[in-house]
Image: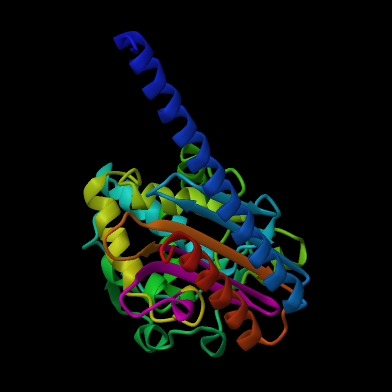
């Protein structure tokens, strides 16, 4: 007959064995997901693709080339929004503050003036309001949901790249660099560009998802803005309609990115970042990101 101590030791051994089996199961599933995503990347013909994923339900992570540096394109608008909210909490501005709408900015290369082209901007109505004023709140909304370049430059000028970088560093997103506004041609030619890694964007979005981006209220407001995103050809296109995605895309010639917080029903969210370079057909780039998104969802949620 077993003693009480022997029974406890037996239960402890069984519990340990179950943990080992569970960890092995998760590891195998993680390997399967990584293999599936790597197959998608190889088939895409992309020059380079980086993926960073963290599941806030299980703590599971998947990183593929996550520290490779990419032109950030419009994904750099996420830390701009975050710094706006940080400065509102510090009392340095308010969301109702009105900024003059103008289309003249200074290059970080030599201080010379430059203007944005409405034809190259996905949001054009702001250009019709030059000389008028818009609230910081409205400009943030246009910057994120419609990826307005003009709104972005007005906001960056207000809060400064230096302060944005302080925020980025404080959140451990060391692979993100926000040096300037959009369409600074002279800076671009000198290699003075906004860049990011998949890991850095994952860190920023995880902070928003976990209410660590400034504070709980600010994080919630930023999530609601990201959920109102109007460009949904990437991560959301690979998901069922019941899944909500708080995300920001970014694209320039040969570059397409999508980075988001994915809210599937009845579980904590997960963060997925996909950065692509060298897929010249943007629809193919959209499809690649959607396929990676679908693979992640099927592995994490539809188990």
Looking at the picture, tell me which residue is in the foreground, 221 or 10.
10
- Start and end of the magenta stretch? 236-261
Q: Picture quarter containing residue 215?
A: top left
At x 59%, y 68%, the residue is 73
**Does 164 lie within the magenta span?**
no
Q: Is residue 147 above or below residue 85?
A: below
In the displayed structure, does residue 5 sit left or right of residue 53? Answer: left
Residue 190 in sight in this render: yes
Looking at the picture, tell me which residue is in the foreground, 59 or 221.
59
At x 37%, y 24%, the residue is 11
In the displayed structure, does residue 58 sit left or right of residue 172? Answer: left
In the displayed structure, does residue 26 sit left or right of residue 6? Answer: right
Image x and y of residue 261, in percent: 40, 61
Image x and y of residue 292, in percent: 57, 70
The furthest residue to the front = 1
**Does 252 lie within the magenta span?**
yes
Q: In the picture, which quadrant includes the N terminus? A: top left
Looking at the picture, tell me which residue is in the foreground, 106 or 17.
17
Residue 157 in sight in this render: no
Q: Main secondary structure of the magenta part?
A: strand
Q: Is residue 84 above or below residue 104?
A: above
Q: How many marks?
A: 0
Q: In the picture, which quadrant includes the C terminus? A: bottom left
Q: Picture quarter containing residue 262?
A: bottom left
Image x and y of residue 40, in percent: 68, 73
At x 57%, y 85%, the residue is 120
């Amino acid at each position: 007959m077993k003693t009480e101590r022997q029974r406890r030791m037996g239960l402890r051994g069984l519990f340990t064995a179950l943990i080992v089996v569970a960890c092995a199961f998760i590891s195998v599933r993680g390997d399967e997901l990584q293999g599936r995503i790597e197959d998608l990347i190889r088939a895409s013909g992309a020059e380079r693709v980086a993926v960073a994923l963290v599941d806030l339900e299980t703590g599971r992570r998947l990183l593929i080339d996550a520290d490779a540096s990419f032109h950030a394109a419009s994904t750099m608008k996420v830390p701009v929004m975050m710094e706006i909210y940080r400065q509102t909490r510090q009392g340095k501005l308010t969301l109702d503050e009105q900024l003059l709408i103008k289309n003249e900015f200074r290059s970080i290369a030599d201080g010379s003036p430059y203007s944005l082209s409405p034809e190259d901007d996905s949001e054009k109505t702001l250009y019709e309001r030059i000389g008028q004023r818009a609230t910081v709140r409205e400009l943030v909304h246009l910057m994120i949901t419609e990826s307005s370049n003009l709104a972005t430059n007005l906001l960056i000028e207000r809060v400064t790249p230096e302060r944005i970088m302080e925020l980025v560093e404080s959140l451990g997103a060391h692979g993100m660099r926000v040096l300037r506004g959009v369409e600074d041609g002279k800076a671009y030619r000198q290699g003075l560009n906004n860049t990011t890694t998949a890991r850095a964007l994952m860190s920023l979005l995880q902070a928003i998802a976990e209410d660590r981006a400034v504070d709980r209220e600010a994080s919630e407001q930023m999530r609601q803005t990201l959920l109102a995103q109007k460009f949904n050809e990437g991560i959301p296109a690979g998901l069922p309609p019941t899944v909500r995605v708080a995300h920001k895309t970014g694209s320039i010639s040969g570059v397409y990115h999508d980075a988001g917080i994915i809210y599937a029903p009845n579980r904590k969210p997960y963060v997925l970042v996909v950065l692509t370079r060298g897929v010249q057909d943007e629809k193919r780039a959209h499809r690649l990101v959607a396929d990676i998104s679908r693979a992640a969802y099927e592995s994490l949620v539809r188990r």
